[in-house]
Image (tube, helix red, strand yellow):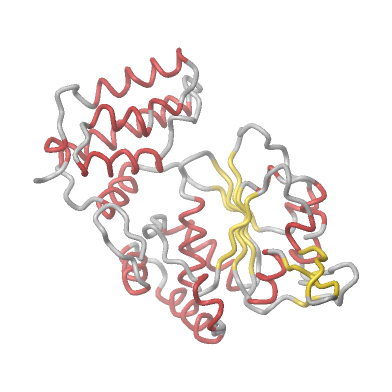
């Protein structure tokens, strides 16, 4: 069992309660429950139903995504860094009760890596299936991480899979009709090295959701969930630090490299374990910038929020 921060374990009930607390449509949550109950998962795939790190906070965004998935659509989550794209994808896969397949696009990811390739087994040529094939057959949710880094060869084979035909053609083998519950969720950040514009044919196969920048209320929810022993002043300054960095990045005064919510959470874990806040924040935030001038700017922002003399007791209760 994976535990984060406070050791809190988010099961289905706690995730649903967090969604209900945001006034997510009750009818929508009931429809999701009906979908979940009417599409049971094979025992061998249950290990792929992954509990999310924390609930997703964002009523409008969650409802748009959930309604689209219920109607059989695939969705593309776009936006700047640290807007919760992967957390949303994890929450959707979990509340829909689907095995998840995370597919990260990189320079060596091609059509055979996605669908499968021939291999010699038991004295015969067999298909060694890839994650898209397994997702399509098993009724999973396939999460295409950083889809705008994909090569043309990798995504061109997906066109029939992603549109109304819902067919996966494997050369040399019979075509596969997608499981009724199979869906695909793409995520993409703007401006990362190696990214490019998605072609029109691919984008037309998704409903696109623009993720909103994190707000102070949302950030407080996230950090309080992970670290319920936060002191009020410590929480205020940590939230202020992240929002200051977000404003600087929005104004192009710094890059998005230090705007790292995962890094901030990791740093806070080390503070709870006993490390002083300043070096912890340096590891999780400041040192993500490799440009000396930018690092100094970020360090200055940290200095205004986190005094050098602070100890873990200034941030967390004893």
Residue 241 located left or right of residue 291:
left
Q: Position of residue 81 (x, y in %)?
A: 50, 39
Q: Position of residue 222 (x, y in %)?
A: 32, 51
Q: Quadrant of residue 197?
A: top right
Number of disc labels: 0
Decide which of 254, 51 is in the foreground and name it: 51
Tell me what residue is drawn at x 24 percent, y 50 percent: 227
Task: Name the quarter where the N terminus is drawn.
Answer: bottom left
Q: Position of residue 106 (x, y in %)?
A: 68, 44
Vertical position of residue 110 compared to residue 38: above or below: above
Decide which of 32, 308 is in the foreground and name it: 308
Q: Position of residue 251 (x, y in %)?
A: 48, 23
Residue 155 located left or right of residue 88:
right
Q: Residue furthest front?
A: 123
Vertical position of residue 1 compared to residue 36: above or below: above
Tell me what residue is drawn at x 22 percent, y 37 percent: 236
Q: Quadrant of residue 79?
A: top right
Tell me what residue is drawn at x 62 percent, y 59 percent: 75
Q: Residue furthest left?
A: 318
Residue 115 located left or right of residue 267:
right
Q: Quadrant of residue 72?
A: bottom right
Vertical position of residue 207 compared to residue 42: above or below: above
Q: Residue furthest right?
A: 172
Tell me what residue is drawn at x 66 percent, y 79 percent: 180
Residue 183 located left or right of residue 283:
right
């Amino acid at each position: 069992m994976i535990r984060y921060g406070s050791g809190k374990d988010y099961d289905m009930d706690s995730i649903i309660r967090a969604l209900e607390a945001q006034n997510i449509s009750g009818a929508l949550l009931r429809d999701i429950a009906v979908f979940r109950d009417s599409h049971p998962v094979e025992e061998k795939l249950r290990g792929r139903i992954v509990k999310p790190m924390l609930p997703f906070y964002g009523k409008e965004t969650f409802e748009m995504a959930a309604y689209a998935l219920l109607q059989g659509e695939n969705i593309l989550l776009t936006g700047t860094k640290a807007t919760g794209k992967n957390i949303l994808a994890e929450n959707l896969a979990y509340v829909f009760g689907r095995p998840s397949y995370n597919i990260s696009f990189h320079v060596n990811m091609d059509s055979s890596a996605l669908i499968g390739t021939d291999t010699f087994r038991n004295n015969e040529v067999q298909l060694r299936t890839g994650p898209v094939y397994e997702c399509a057959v098993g009724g999973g949710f396939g999460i295409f991480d950083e889809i705008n880094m994909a090569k043309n060869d990798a995504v061109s084979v997906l066109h029939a899979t992603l549109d109304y035909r819902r067919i996966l053609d494997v050369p040399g083998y019979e075509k596969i009709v997608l499981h009724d519950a199979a869906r695909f969720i793409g995520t993409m950040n703007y401006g990362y090295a190696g990214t490019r514009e998605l072609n029109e044919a691919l984008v037309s196969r998704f409903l696109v959701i623009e993720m909103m920048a994190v707000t102070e209320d949302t950030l407080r929810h996230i950090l309080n969930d992970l670290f319920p022993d936060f002191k009020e002043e410590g929480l205020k300054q940590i939230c202020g630090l992240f929002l200051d960095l977000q404003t600087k990045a929005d104004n192009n005064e710094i890059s998005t490299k230090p705007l790292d919510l995962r890094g901030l959470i990791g740093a806070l874990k080390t503070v709870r374990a006993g490390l002083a806040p300043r070096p912890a924040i340096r590891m999780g935030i400041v040192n993500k910038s490799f440009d000396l001038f930018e690092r100094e700017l970020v360090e200055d922002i940290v200095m205004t929020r986190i005094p050098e003399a602070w100890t873990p007791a200034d941030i967390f209760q004893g």
